[in-house]
Amino acid sequence: MTLRRRVTLLAVTIAAAPLVLGGCTADRGPASGKAHAAAPELTVTPGDKAREVPVSAEVGTAVKGGRITAVRLTDDKGKQVKAEPREDGSGWVPSTPLQAKRTYTVEVTATGDSGATASRTTTFTTMATSTKPQITSTLYFSGNQTYGTAMPVTVAFDPGIPKEARADVQRRLFVKTNPPQPGAWSWLDDGSQVYYRAPDFWRPGTTISVRAGLEGLPIGKDRVGDEDRTATSTIGKQVALEIDNDTKQMTVLRDGKQIRRIPVSLGKSSTPSSSGKMVIMEKHERTTFDTRGEPNGGYVVDVDDAQRLTWGGEFIHSAPWSEGDQGSTNVSHGCTNVAATAAEWLMGVTQVGDLVTVKGTEVQLQAGNGWTAWNVSWDEFARGSALPVPPGLRPAPVAPAHPGAVAGGSPAPAPSVSGR
């Protein structure tokens, strides 16, 4: 089966706290006859009169002996530019990319521990639209959707992001959750995809807002990011599917409780199904599998109620032609075959982003063959981040096991369809 590589993005969490915007406050001298209070030391970037600044620029701030109390960014027509602070306080990120060949003014005020203030004002000009080749990015997280509890935020890149540029890209990937549920980004080795998830499955009802703020971002020496993308969606009920090759049965769980068992037929020995933790990537009431040109393919067939699990073409789908084998014998080209009535029922139960666990087959799921963020331990996932992951960010202690205590999730549609 062919692994279709997709590029990914990385991201970092941005604080949800609102930006305090206000006018610049002049330094206040001490009252007459009193000792002079030490003003904080304040540094602002971009520097004054800086030119050829990328449209992805942020307002960087550093302060000693105090804290930032006001930031105001305006364009050359006096219009205020909305921005939000980074969680670590290192800067303020404009909510949309700056415009090319425009002049901006930054006014920053810091208040010292003693109450004294310091202000800095800088003016900078952005560069013309870059003529460098763009790296194409794809955000597999759509807005106004309901996803499963295992839904990773996935960003793909073409070509893949080189290691030396991944930290810069990751810093421009932002995820906010309500209620808060912190997570981390993790890159595939080839830089083609980056996943974001929390140590544990998303809680049902969580709202997730994503921004891939890559437009105009310098990536390495000779490329730039393509677009700025945003999306907000919610997490639905906890649904999970467990497929066991030994029993040839699929167990369907909702909120950790079994609601149905379904006989299945998996991939035959020459075209085995993958074992591992997958996520439902897309759902089709009807689609066409075209495997002409693939090593084990050569057929074209229409199928109903198909749910994609991998880029390589593994689906759960209706297979009335194999109903006599379901529950006893593997006859598929790698897909999970179920009866027509069961496939139709599943379509009404599952969500994109639900977890699907397959075990007992001849081959293991390859990293990146689908959204494989859950197919590794949290420690291994965290090692894939290009930026430090807080050491306290860990999975919750495992409660005493009870049958089916797992969860699921859901992402956005993917191009092209081939089946097994």
Image (cartoon, helix red, strand yellow):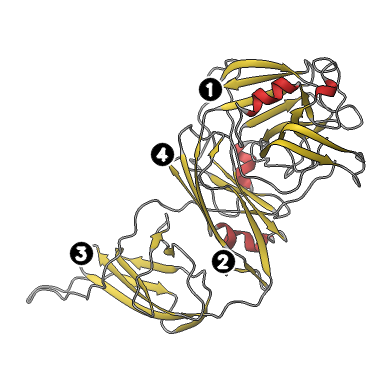
In the picture of the structure, the residue carrying the numbered disc 4 is 179
Between the C-alphas of marks 1 and 4, the distance is: 19 Å
User: Where in the figure is residue 415, as x and y percent of width and height?
Assistant: 72, 49
Between the C-alphas of marks 2 and 1, the distance is: 40 Å
Q: Which mark is residue 196?
A: none
Left-right relation of 30 to 76: left
Mark 1 surroundings within 10 Å by alpha-carbon count, few (fewer than 14), some (14 through 19), many (20 or more):
some
Left-right relation of 16 to 10: left
Secondary-structure class at tag 2: loop
Q: Is residue 342 visible?
A: yes
Between the C-alphas of marks 3 and 1, the distance is: 54 Å
In the picture of the structure, the residue carrying the numbered disc 3 is 114
Q: Nearer the viewer, mark 4 or mark 2?
A: 2
Q: Earlier in the sequence, mark 3 or mark 2?
A: 3
Hey, which quadrant is residue 380 in on the image? top right
Q: Which mark is residue 215?
A: 2
Which residue is found at the position 78% from the left and 18% from the top? 248
In the picture of the structure, the residue carrying the numbered disc 1 is 255
